[in-house]
Image (cartoon, grey):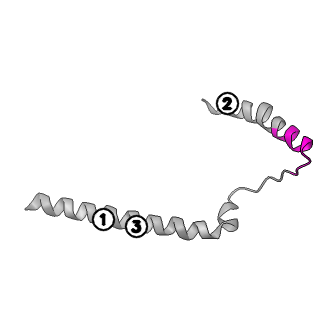
Amino acid sequence: MTSVIFLDWFKNEFIPSVTKFHKEKKKKVQFLPPNITATLQQMDQGVIEKIKRIYRKQLLHHHFWQKRTKRA
């Protein structure tokens, strides 16, 4: 799928369908500004940071042992 096809679908199919659905169900749709997720979901930042630390530690550990076993 190209970005042109996606944007066409998004603007001409998805948004009108969602708008119609919410009008029928009497629901309010509110779009959030970009990059607001980290502000609203601060706990996720801690979780993601922890996962990154664990990944880096395992990556360094793997490379260290890989180089060490090649020398032996």
Q: Is residue 37 left or right of residue 60?
A: right
Q: Is 56 placed above or below 9 here?
A: below
Residue 11 locus on image (x, y percent): 78, 35
The amino acid marked with disc number 3 is Ile
Residue carrying label 3: 54
Query: How far from the left and from the top, in percent, is residue 6?
Result: 67, 33
Disc 2 marks which residue? 4
Secondary structure, mark 2, is helix
Q: Which residues are magenta?
A: 18-28
- Are the residues flagged by discs 3 and 1 in contact, CB closer than 8 Å? no
Real-space CA distance between mark 3 and mark 1, rounded to the nearest whole angstrom: 10 Å
Classify the position of the N terminus by image quarter: top right
Q: How many other residues sit within 10 Å of disc 3, few (<14), some (14-19) or many (≥20)?
A: few
Which tag, 1 or 2, sits closer to the chain's start?
A: 2
Viewer-nearest of discs 3 and 1: 3
Distance (Cα) linking label 3 and label 2: 38 Å
| Location of residue 69 (image quadrant) | bottom left
Q: Are marks 3 and 2 in contact (CB under 8 Å)?
A: no
Depth order, front residue of 37/7: 37
- Residue plotted at (88% across, 52% down): 28
Overall secondary structure of the magenta section: helix
Check disc 1 and report its element: helix, strand or loop: helix
Q: Residue at x 92, y 48 (%)?
A: 26
Callout 2: 10 Å neighbours few (<14), some, many (20+)?
A: few
Residue 68 occupies quadrant: bottom left
Tell me the number on the disc at residue 60: 1
For the view shown, which residue lies furthest in the left direction? 72
Mark 3 or mark 2: whose residue is earlier in sequence: 2
Residue 44 against residue 19 in the figure, above or below: below
Q: Is residue 19 part of the magenta span, yes or no? A: yes
Q: Position of residue 65 (x, y in %)?
A: 20, 63
